[in-house]
Amino acid sequence: MQTVRQLTELREAIGAYREAGESVALVPTMGALHDGHMALVEAAKRAGSRVAVSIFVNPIQFGPNEDLAKYPRREQADSRMLAGAGIDLLWMPPVEVMYPEGFASKVSVSGISEVLDGAHRPGHFDGVATVVTKLFNQVQPQVALFGEKDWQQLAVIRRMVADLDMPVEIIGVPVQREDDGLALSSRNAYLMPEDRARAIALPRALGAAERTISEGGDVEAALAQARETLAAAGFEVDYVTLTDAETLGDPVPGRPRRLLAAASIGGTRLIDNIPVA
Ligand code: PAF
């Protein structure tokens, strides 16, 4: 595994792959890697002949009152995990390489970035779209893999890639879960044991709502029940909602639907989602 931190070294490595006729699959991450990321890496190995992983805690996707300063950073452990998984390239640019002085551009995907998490985290998806565009331009992958846990992020990136004719195939990888159902997330590390125990209410509430809705039950009642269950478990609920899976607008008969939730427990904000038949 080659670890690079400067654009010149990155371009050399990518140029050599291209000359050898290799295809590159990119897994963009913010580090603090867990089995969810490793599932992306395994899918990337099947999708390209070379696998590149980026680790960059992207300051412009964090709001002023969010967890940028305390976001877990575990460079050495991450690096060992990736080397063990047999990836080819680790791209770890310092912040001044990603955003040099005078940086002034922004990629913004309207509509889909403004609802749900976008409404609760203004500017978040502009930060994501901007850094993902930069990562695509830097690494020039043929394929890029993202976790379905961040369903809205995946939908925003798919919209952006289609709108801007970016020559990269986007693959979504299903949510990876703990044995009790909690979706894997780097932010789970913030949960105190008591909150970790209560956090299973989130996948359970989604599962119960999904069953009611797919059996033809009342959607609003199912969503209200899920919100109540979460509040009773100690969550502060941002949203529990049923949307069109692709546009995140209102569900449309005959099209895939997705149940999405965001809620905080003990100051940690968790998100989760599941498909609804
Ligand atoms: O999902 C993440 O870890 C980040 O939002 C991403 C896609 C790496 C952009 O910083």
Image (cartoon, rainbow, N blue to C red):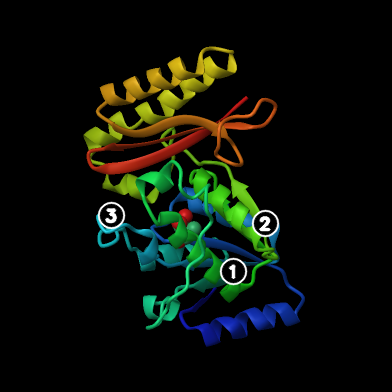
Image coordinates of residue 197 in percent, x first then y, are: 29, 31
Amino acid, disc 3: Glu
Image coordinates of residue 89 in percent, x first then y, are: 56, 72
- Relative to 145, say whether 16 is above or below: below
Whether residue 180 is visible here, answered yes or no, is no
What's the residue at 75%, 79% (across, down)? 20
- Relative to 252, say whether 45 is above or below: below
Location of mark 2 (residue): 162
Location of mark 1 (residue): 136
Amino acid, disc 2: Ala
Q: Is residue 115 left or right of residue 49?
A: left
Whether residue 182 is visible here, answered yes or no, is yes
- Relative to 191, say whether 223 is above or below: above
Asked whether the beta carbons under mark 2 and mark 3 sit within 8 Å of each other, the answer is: no
Q: Quadrant of the N terminus?
A: bottom right
Asked where in the image residue 139 lies, by quadrant, the reply is: bottom right
